Image (cartoon, rainbow, N blue to C red):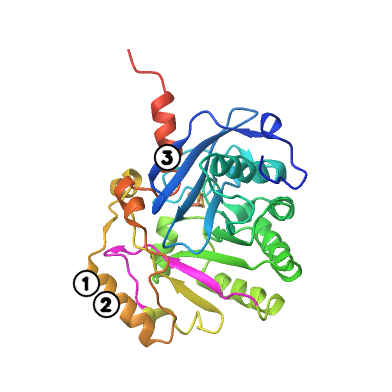
Amino acid sequence: MVGTGGAAVNDTLTVKKDLVFDFGDRDDGAIGIPGITEDGKVIETSYFFGKARPKNIIVVSSQAGCPMRCTFCELGEERFARNLSPEEIRDQAVLMLEQAQMRGFDAVHVPHKVTVANSGEPLLNAQLVDGLDLLAGLPVRSFKISTVLPRSEVTAKVLADLADFAARTERPVQLQISLISTLEERRFRMSPGAASFRKIREAGEIWHSKNPTGRKVNLSLILAEKMPCVAADVVGMFPSELFRFRFREYVPTENGRDHGIREISPERLADIKREFAGQGYEVGDWASPSPMERKFGLASNVIRKTYLRMTSPIPA
Ligand code: SF4
């Protein structure tokens, strides 16, 4: 059994498995679980590993459903149900570490990062930091919180709590904000409840003031054909002392396709990266989807959607 830091053993976890998906091989693979909560909500938990990764990554959900309804997300129009409890956030990682150990990973000594990203918007869950405190009892070396940064008072409070958590824990904590586009109007169109660029800048300042030696805030773009991604338009708003850009090509999904999002060409991607480097940003390939992720179209919530399709009744 995985060292659970006092967590319950498998049969009493608050999140259970009904199906486990295995993708790829040992060099580039993933495990995906549609996690089932005690009240029957389906969330997504995943585990990524491979030779190109310095850490194995456990990705957990923070909510059942999501109020944000971003047009590019595979949760699509699904309604928000509820926030996950701190125990449900932790138990997803316990469940996944057990699955990893069953496949021969040394869950205690292999470095693990926990990313809060899959189903839901973490900065709308007021108990997010309580969940991270529970996760800190597991063999986890670092954390990443991936957010759209909603326009909400709850978000301001959770962000402050999260910055305090990052300041008091010895483990690195990465805040990643999905900027979506360098054109603010496009950001609002794709995520109507998202905060303004000005609020993102303020979030970067808060983060830096509480964690002056910590990691810069990541800004991620949807790197897709025709998505405005122009470094010169945002360099004044998002200085490279506070922010770095994360370059991850868009992986095609059904919902994205239905909203007209198309894969980026290698030439355009290279141009965008060159331009960002020219404005003084760190530019790298570390976040590019792996061949396995491209092959199976593994974007957030794709595994969950596949499961729901498999288990829905066949129309008569
Ligand atoms: S991208 Fe994130 S915040 Fe937007 S709908 Fe999907 S889960 Fe919610």
Q: Which mark is residue 271?
A: 2
| Residue 22: image tag | 3
Crowd band around label 2 with a 10 angstrom C-alpha radius: few (<14), some (14–19), many (20+): few
Task: Pick the quarter of the image with the C terminus.
Answer: top left
Q: Position of residue 50 (x, y in %)?
A: 43, 56
Q: Residue at x 38, y 83 (%)?
A: 277
Callout 3: SS: strand
Whichever of callouts 3 and 1 sits on the residue coming sooner in the sequence is 3
Q: Position of residue 106 (x, y in %)?
A: 58, 50
Q: Nearer the viewer, residue 109 or 276?
A: 109
Identify the residue at image location x=45%, y=51%: 70
Residue type at the position of mark 3: Asp
Q: Secondary structure at mark 1?
A: helix
**Was residue 217 drawn as part of the magenta stretch in this picture?**
yes
**Residue visible at 34% across and 64% down?**
223
Q: Does the CB distance between marks 3 and 1 fall below 8 Å?
A: no
Residue 94: % across, % down: 64, 43
What's the amino acid at mark 1? Glu
> Element type at marker 2?
helix
Q: Is residue 52 magenta?
A: no
**Pointers 2 and 1 in contact (C-beta within 8 Å):** yes
Q: Position of residue 218 (x, y in %)?
A: 51, 70
Is residue 116 shown above or below 316?
A: below
Image quarter where the N terminus lies is top right
Report the residue marked by disc 1: 267
Q: Is residue 99 left or right of residue 247?
A: right
What's the magenta region?
214-230
